[in-house]
C-alpha cells in the first residue's frame, strides 16, 4: 500500500489592519509622513468616497494610499513581471462602524502567487516596513 503525503501550504493573512484613535484625516496624514520616513514614496491617494460619490453612491470615508520603494519594485519586477499586478503596495484608511482603521496588503503573500519568482527575503522585509508604517501611523 502506498503512503500518500499531502503537503499543506500555510495560508498567510492577506492584510495587516489596526484601529486608530486618530481622525480619518489625521490617519491619512500620518500614513503619508511615516511612508516618507520609511524611505518609500506616496505615489497617489485615491479618494474612493469621492470617486464613488460622483456616481451617486455613498460610502464612509475611504482612501487608498499607493506607496512604493523603487529599488524593491525593480527587484520584484525583474524576478517576475506579473508581480506588477500587485504594485504599488497599498495602504487603506477607512471608517467602519464609527472607527478609523489603517490596513495594508501583506507583501509576504507574493510567494503564494509567484512561487517560482525566487524573491528571497524581500517580501518579508517589505512586509515589515508596511507593518511599521501602519503601526507608526496609528
Image (spheres, rainbow, N blue to C red):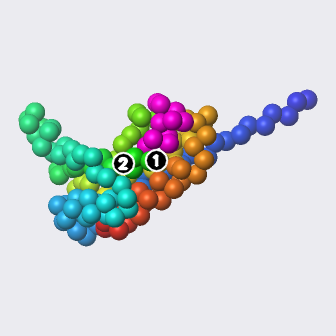
104 sits to left or right of 6:
left
Please state the horizontal and vertical placement of residue 50, each as a whole percent of the image: 12, 43
Residue 36 picture quarter: bottom left
Quadrant of the snapshot with the N terminus? top right
Please state the horizontal and vertical placement of residue 104, each as a whole percent of the image: 37, 52
Q: Can you tell which mark lies on residue 41?
A: none
Q: What's the residue at 19%, 65% (across, down)? A: 26
Q: Is residue 70 in view from this perspective? A: yes
Element type at marker 1?
helix
Magenta stretch: includes residue 38:
no
In the depicted structure, whether residue 111 falls above or below residue 33 = above
Judged by its main secondary structure, the magenta piece is helix
Looking at the image, which is closer to me, 113 or 34?
A: 34
Give the CA separation, mark 1 to mark 2. 8 Å
Element type at marker 2?
strand
Q: Which residue is mark 1?
A: 72
Q: What's the residue at 52%, 49% (across, down)? A: 123
Check if mark 1's residue and mark 2's residue have beta carbons within 8 Å: yes
Q: Which residue is mark 2?
A: 68
Magenta stretch in the rendered image: 72-82
Looking at the image, which is closer to me, 25 or 101?
A: 25
Q: What's the residue at 58%, 51% (across, down)? A: 121
Please state the horizontal and vertical placement of residue 51, each as a whole percent of the image: 14, 39
Q: What's the residue at 38%, 62% (across, down)? A: 38
Amino acid at each position: 500500500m502506498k503512503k500518500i503525503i499531502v503537503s499543506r501550504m500555510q495560508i498567510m493573512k492577506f492584510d495587516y489592519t489596526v484601529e486608530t484613535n486618530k481622525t480619518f484625516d489625521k490617519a491619512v496624514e500620518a500614513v503619508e509622513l511615516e511612508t516618507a520616513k520609511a524611505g518609500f514614496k506616496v505615489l497617489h491617494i485615491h479618494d474612493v468616497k469621492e470617486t464613488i460619490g460622483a456616481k451617486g453612491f455613498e460610502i464612509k470615508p475611504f482612501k487608498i494610499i499607493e506607496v512604493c520603494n523603487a529599488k524593491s519594485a525593480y527587484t520584484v519586477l525583474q524576478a517576475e513581471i506579473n508581480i506588477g499586478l500587485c504594485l504599488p503596495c497599498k495602504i487603506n484608511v477607512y471608517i467602519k462602524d464609527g472607527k478609523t482603521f489603517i490596513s495594508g496588503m501583506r507583501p509576504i503573500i507574493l510567494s503564494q502567487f509567484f512561487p517560482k519568482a525566487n524573491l528571497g527575503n524581500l517580501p518579508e522585509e517589505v512586509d515589515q516596513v508596511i507593518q511599521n508604517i501602519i503601526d507608526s501611523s496609528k
